[in-house]
Amino acid sequence: MNYLIHLVLAAVMVTGTGLAQDNAELQKMANDDQQARFSPNIDWNELNKQDSIRMERVRTLLDQGQVKTAQDHFNAGIIFQHGEDSITSNLAVKCFGKAILMDSTLNKRRFAAAVDRDLMRKGKPQVYGTQFIQDAGTGKFKRYIIDTAKVSDAERLHYGVETLAQQQEKERLMNLKSISAYYAKTNSTEEAIVLTRAQSEKGKGADDDIYENKLINIGIQLKNASKNQEALAIFDLIIRLYPDSYRGYTLYTSTLKKSGKMDKEYKTYIKNASDKAKKAAMSVAGIDAVRGENLIYFIDNLSSILKQGYLVSLDCLVFDCGLFREK
């Protein structure tokens, strides 16, 4: 499990830090580094300039012995990982490596990604499998070349990286067409449903991303636009494709509430939803027995509760009240 971590140990020795405090300047630089990458409109020229300034400053702090704690080294790694040459990519490996040796609770995947990125910068195969590249000709994504013999799947999992089989599935998912983009282009719920059903029959041979969360996004978009019948059609499809989806049942019934259809159709769905919702409720992490039983009571008596006006919608019960928490 320590094949690559030994490379770091050979280069950097972990020294005692005593009661050293985390370097506030380094923390701010790491925060700025990450926040800049979440901007909706990134000015890459400016970002590259700021990256260079931050990397130069971290080098100075290293020379001055101001990078002391595990978090300091981790933050230094965050900054160095954006370097475009093998010198800075190697510094990222050393910093992340030293950080997780000093504090094993830090994000180990950062180290694995830094190792792969450093090898890629040097024109060598990666070993963990964190790096994917886009083919300029086809536009498709593929995993960068990998030497599968250097690291075991057990070590990959230890460092928060997918197994080789999971990486193959990840590559497949990355290249699926977006059902959301298809709907945006056609603006037709009916066509989106037809396509989804056809793709569902293909299983893993599907060309489009019809996973639950993508369909839910379309349904919520329709619901917010008060296109209730179209939203119901999407949520109905989700329930049929993903029968254990508590969100599918929740959104369907709350849309029925919004559209004023709370009679026979509602009763049929809440009856079908009950067992599924109970199963989901008791399996969600962090829900104790009392809260779980309370939720089951709400579900079993939801029709009368909603009709009496105690709850605005199922969305309030399940999400706003915090009874469910997604894994």
Image (tube, rainbow, N blue to C red):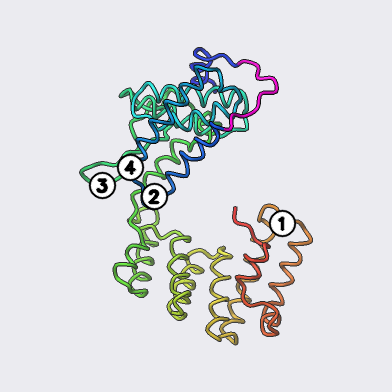
The quarter holding residue 49 reads top left
The circle drawn on residue 139 is 3
Q: Secondary structure at mark 2?
A: helix
Spatial separation of the CA atoms under disc 4 and disc 2:
27 Å
Q: Height in image: 41 above or below 70?
A: below
Residue 245 in picture, x, y percent from top left: 55, 64
Q: Secondary structure at mark 4?
A: helix
Q: Earlier in the sequence, mark 2 or mark 3?
A: 3
Task: Report the side of 63 relative to 49 (left or right).
Answer: right
Prevalent SS, magenta region: loop
Q: Earlier in the sequence, mark 4 or mark 2?
A: 4
Q: Height in image: 311 above or below 95?
A: below
Residue designated by label 2: 173
Label 4 neighbourhood size at 10 Å, few (<14), some (14-19), many (20+)? few
Amino acid beneath label 2:
Leu
Amino acid beneath label 3:
Gly
Q: Identify the residue shown where x is 57% and y is 28%.
A: 72
- Image quarter where the N terminus lies is top right
Spatial separation of the CA atoms under disc 1 and disc 2:
31 Å
Spatial separation of the CA atoms under disc 1 and disc 3:
44 Å
Residue designated by label 1: 287
Residues shaded magenta: 15-24
Spatial separation of the CA atoms under disc 1 and disc 4:
44 Å
- Closest to the observer, 1 or 32: 32
In this view, the mark in front (1 or 2): 1
In this view, the mark in front (1 or 4): 4
